[in-house]
Image (tube, rainbow, N blue to C red):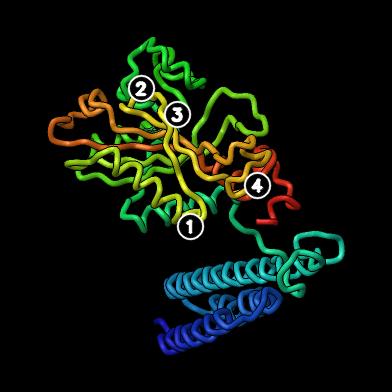
Amino acid sequence: MTDTAPQSAVRDTLAEFEAGAARAFEVAEDAETLRELESTLLGRRSRLGDLQRQLSTFAPEDRRDLGQAIQAARARLVELAGARRADLDARARADALAADRLDLTEAMSLGAGWGGPGRTDSGGGDPALPWRGHLNLVTQTRDALEDTFVSLGFSVAEGPEAETDWYNFEALNMPPAHPARGMWDTLYLRLGAPETVLLRTHTSPVQVRTMESEKPPIYVVAPGRCYRRDTPDARHLPVFHQIEGLVVDRGITFGDLAGTIEAFTTAYFGPDVHSRLRPSYFPFTEPSAEFEVTCPICGGAGCRTCSHSGWIELGGCGMVDPAVFAAVGIDAEEYSGFAFGFGIDRLAQVRVGLADMRTLLDNDLRFLRQF
Ligand code: DAH
């Protein structure tokens, strides 16, 4: 006959033991404590070991059941200990990472001694603070131009720097082999058929894109980067910026163009600077003009910057050619418009009296920090 009382007593002891051991593992605070607990609770000399040894006093059929119960309890506890170890390892890794973290504010102040980023010597501003970066002069100029035109009622448009021949030339009334294409030394991209994809040589393609996607009335400016196959010199950069303007509405006249240019000039340069238009040629405008402003350096008296003429040429403009309207499907009988475009880098150069445009790209902090 089987002695059932001792068997249930063993099961009770086992359950009680398992619950206590599980709690102990769950609250183990570090890997060392966990290791000790494993040895005392699961090792050969543990309570579990004792129970195991007691099995021999039971009848064989009870022995098997109890043995399985003990093994199952052990397996659950081993698993719990493993999970706890994984938790503790993860926490230790996180602590190590936090301890290794670089304190960059400390690096900033360390730089103070050797002219590093934390230098506090002659950086301008509060000498107790590290130097601060700011936008490049060209970016500041672009932002100021956008603000000026937005205040005149224009909105701001954008277009891609990699363009197709259609937008950069053809839709602007320059079919293939048109001689005026020679006005722009073009960088072509090795993409598609030869000479079909290029880096835009001016912002005028944004005119075409805008007229394709919007119906008149249109009042937009489009600032952006342009590229030409030019050797850099004091007045030219192969990568530069332009701002394009386009107005299309009913009854727009050349007078509106001249008035807008003058309004922009005084809004941007102040009341002492004026504009004038001189006849010129562009394939996408008819009539076309160059616009010039009073030399802001000498106030019109004549100086080296304006070649003693008192005027500085800023860009081109004119009335949108009906052929351009035809390319984008705008009825030239119903609408008329004007367009203009000028160099942002050139404007910045004129405004601050910069002898050489290349300094804009040199990344020399002694130059850049003046603005
Ligand atoms: N795209 C011309 C250039 O890069 C400048 C220009 C002239 C733009 C006349 C215009 C314009 O919109 O009407 O030289």
Name the amino acid, label 3: Arg
Q: Earlier in the sequence, mark 1 or mark 4?
A: 1
Name the amino acid, label 1: Pro
Question: Between tags 1 and 4, which lies in front?
Answer: 1
Considering the image in quadrants, where does the C terminus appear?
A: bottom right
Residue at image mark 3: 200
Residue 1: quarter of image:
bottom left
Where is residue 94 shown, x and y percent of the image?
63, 68
Where is residue 221 shown, x and y percent of the image?
37, 45
In the image, 64 versus 31, the foreground residue is 31
- Is the CB of the residue bearing disc 1 within 8 angstroms of ligand 1? no
Residue at image mark 1: 271
Q: Earlier in the sequence, mark 4 or mark 2?
A: 2
Tag 3 secondary structure: loop
Which residue is located at x 28 percent, y 42 percent?
247
Question: Between tags 3 and 4, which lies in front?
Answer: 4
Circle 4 Cα neighbour tier, 10 Å, few/some/many (<14 / 14–19 / ≥20): some
Q: Earlier in the sequence, mark 2 or mark 3?
A: 3
Q: Earlier in the sequence, mark 2 or mark 1?
A: 1
Residue 353, label in figure: 4
Q: Is residue 364 above or below residue 336?
A: below
Distance, label 1 to label 4, CA atoms, is 19 Å
Where is residue 314 shown, x and y percent of the image?
50, 38
Residue 283, label in figure: 2
Q: Quadrant of ligand 1?
A: top left
